[in-house]
Image (tube, rainbow, N blue to C red):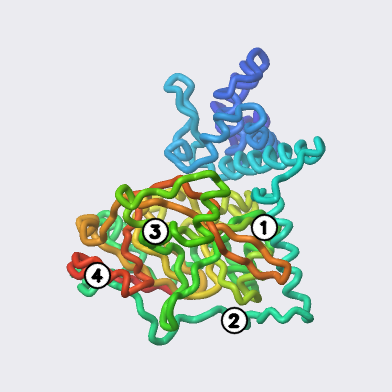
Amino acid sequence: LYGASLKGSVDFAQCERAFQLERDLLFAPGDCFHIVELAVLLRGATKVPAAIAEGSRLLRGLPFDCLAEAEKLSGLGKHWLEATNRTAGIYGLASNLYSVADIRQGIRDASYVAWDQNVAKGQKIDSKERWGHVDVFQAAVSVNRLQDESLTIAKRQKCKQLPKQHTLAKPSIEDELKCLKVSPDQFARKCLQQHRPCILSGQANSFLRQRDGTSSLDRWVKLAGNASIRVSFPFPPTFSEGIASLNNIEETTAYFQREEVHRSLEEKNMEAPTSSEFPWTLVRPAQWNMRLSDAVTWARSHPQDIYMNQQMLADLGGIALNELNLPQWVVAAGLRLLSPSLWFASGAVVTGYHYDGPENLLVQLEGDKEVILLRPSAMENLYYMATADVEADVRLQDDGSARVAGLRVVNRSTSGHSVIDVANAQQAAQFPLYAQAAGVNCKVG
């Protein structure tokens, strides 16, 4: 750093601060504030490869040295944008996504260490429990079975398309706001400042480094195919014109009387939620851990639908973050990337009404997406209410299929989702105020 500062490629104040932090750590090597500040400072010294490597090492070691701080910093929040300030008691990563990636990699490393210790001690693993590392291995075995031509499992030939006569319970009234189509130079003034939804055509590729001869999905497989991710198995449609769904809305009493659900409660020694407190239950799809490369192979070859939800690029490592490019019109609007993430689905799938916190830029790299937006004032017409929040369970079978049955997670509740099931028009018809809801329909792709 000192040598780089003499050449003018690094601010001398950075070099001086690094020296002060190093000196203080000699006398207090366990000072987490100093470790985090120094690590982020070094990680951001892009002109000095040795500094980047040392900063990365410190951050990946944070879960071993400062576990509580690592856990906090690994989760999405303002601390990703703020700088560490000892006086104010603030830990922060100063908008450095590479620091986020290093800490989250360190947590995964620590998890593997804990797993390895359990195995070394001969600790028996309950067959009813789920371990992420075992998930990944079992998924790899199932995907390898897709190459076995002796199996009778039907292979997927291409991504499923929407049924021509599909039925979704969309708002019957079109909001006068509509979804504007604008040029990049109009984005800040007409969209961001007005809090209006907009579509900018032909801009998707400007968010990525240019690569020839590689599809957008294969790009990530090539860079980070061995990274562990989490996928979901959407609920299949309940009728011929239906669409697979990422959240079923069920009447609480009837749902918890189902045999496999009741059995799950008995195994977990838990009571069913009461319909008086939660008339409705939000059922989230079963999830599984697998390598990114296996997930893509499954999506392309397996007959069972799969969905990858909000996979943070930081979890794919710095090599994936290197692929990002922030267009000038985004920078000019004063926006910063907080949590760039990837989604993909093997076929048509629908998710219900919910709301997000941060501003979103949705970049459609392949395929199509339809987004239905409503004003915050329409929440009453959408029947947001407290619901029981559960997650289905799944087991991978010997024939390479995934059997979804029972529950993995039970003791949660949420108020962040509507109880209208947009994938089930018959269920949605039970809510009369929904007929008064006005929505904006935005299609990208």
Residue type beneath disc 4: Lys
Mark nearer the N terminus (1 vs 4): 4
Does residue 169 appear in this view? yes
Snapshot quadrant of residue 299: bottom right
Q: Residue at x 46, y 27 (%)?
A: 90
Give the residue at mark 3.
329
For the N terminus, give its image quadrant: top right
Residue drawn at point x = 44 percent, y = 59 percent: 257
Q: Position of residue 269 (x, y in %)?
A: 53, 44
Callout 3: SS:
helix
Q: Amino acid at mark 3?
A: Trp
Q: Is residue 441 above or below residue 188?
A: below
The amino acid sitting under disc 2 is Lys
> Alpha carbon of mark 3 to alpha carbon of mark 4: how far?
22 Å
Picture quadrant of residue 115: top right
Question: What number is the disc on residue 178?
Answer: 4
The one of 20 and 74 positioned closer to us in this rendering: 74
Q: Are marks 1 and 4 in contact (CB under 8 Å)?
A: no
Q: In front: mark 3 or mark 4?
A: 4
> Mark 2 touching mark 1, by CB under 8 A?
no
Mark toward the viewer: 2 or 3: 2
First reached walking from the N terminus: tag 2 or tag 1: 2
Nearer the viewer's eye, disc 4 or disc 2? 2
Residue labelled with disc 1: 224
- Figure check: 137 above or below 172: above
Mark 3 surroundings within 10 Å by alpha-carbon count, few (fewer than 14), some (14 through 19), many (20 or more): some
Q: Which mark is residue 158?
A: 2
